[in-house]
Image (spheres, helix red, strand yellow):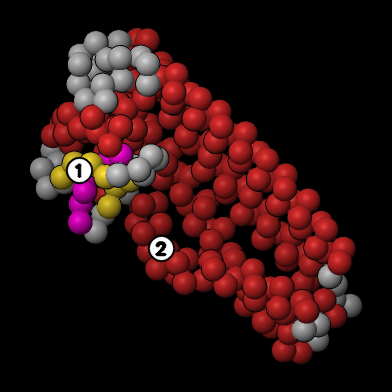
Amino acid sequence: MGGIGIGYWILIGAIALVSWLVSNKLKKKFEKYSKVHLRNGMSGQEIAEKMLADNGISDVEVISVKGQLTDHYNPKNKTVNLSESVFNQRNAAAAAVAAHECGHAVQHAQAYSALKMRSALVPVVSVTSGMSQWLVIGGLILGAAAGAGFGYWIAVAGLVFMSFATLFSFITLPVEYDASNRALAWLKTGNMLTPEEYKSSEDALKWAARTYLVAAIGALASLLYWAMAVFGGRD
């Protein structure tokens, strides 16, 4: 387990570093584009409400929630939840986030398949993700590396649980990219933004999507690492 531990922490450190670099870049991008004020003077709330209306959606409410980067669409109660800064501000960053979250509402209204799959996985992942790594490590300690007995099957169960989280991360990618594409298409065809404002919004959403890409790659790398630890040690 000593060698496994060292290798794992190197992997986790590398993933954490890349994740931090992307997140830091995203933060700087949003700070930059928060200074690009919209010529139309619309707030994030108004952008969201207009996008919903233009897509024929009348049963979704746009509300303000506390915190930063807390923006999300809730399919259960059909609400577009915008952080206070996005809800109130009138800049390219706020427009990008507001339109993106409405993109999820449009997906829901149109029964977008990837969103349905991700929603179905939410209750499974919420139960399995927290215990998966501990099951794998516990199984290895009990002798899974030798492929013997009870410990091995505990580790395999942990890998199955971990695979649900990895699958969730990869299903999230098309959901997020599609929501951004819907948002940008609406912002462009509806002439909501000037060319400069649109370019800022587009770049902000590209960097936001990269955080999901890093998370998915990290989840897959971790799954493969532990799978090698469990199956690679068998005779």
Q: Quadrant of the N terminus?
A: bottom right
Label 1's element? strand
Q: Give the answer, above or below, for where 214 lies relative to 235.
A: above
Q: Position of residue 152 (x, y in %)?
A: 74, 82
Q: Position of residue 160 (x, y in %)?
A: 60, 71
Q: Give the answer, above or below, for where 115 lies relative to 121.
A: above
* Circle 2 residues within 10 Å: few <14, some 14–19, many ≥20: few
Q: Residue at x 77, y 76 (%)?
A: 140
* Circle 1 residues within 10 Å: few <14, some 14–19, many ≥20: some
**Quick check: 57 left or right of 25?**
left
Pick the front one: 65 or 115: 65
Tag 2 residue: 122
Q: As shown in the figure, which amino acid type bears the numbered disc 1? A: Ile
Could one spot residue 190 in this view of the protein? no
Q: Residue at x 44, y 23 (%)?
A: 31
Q: Position of residue 148 (x, y in %)?
A: 80, 86
Pick the front one: 18 or 109: 18
Q: Verify whether residue 81 appears in magenta.
A: yes
Kindly indicate the quadrant of the structure image that contains residue 43. Answer: top left
Residue interval drawn in magenta: 77-83
Q: Verify whether residue 116 appears in magenta.
A: no
Label 2's element? helix
Q: Give the answer, above or below, for where 213 lies relative to 24.
A: below
Q: Residue furthest left?
A: 58
Could one spot residue 37 in this view of the protein? yes
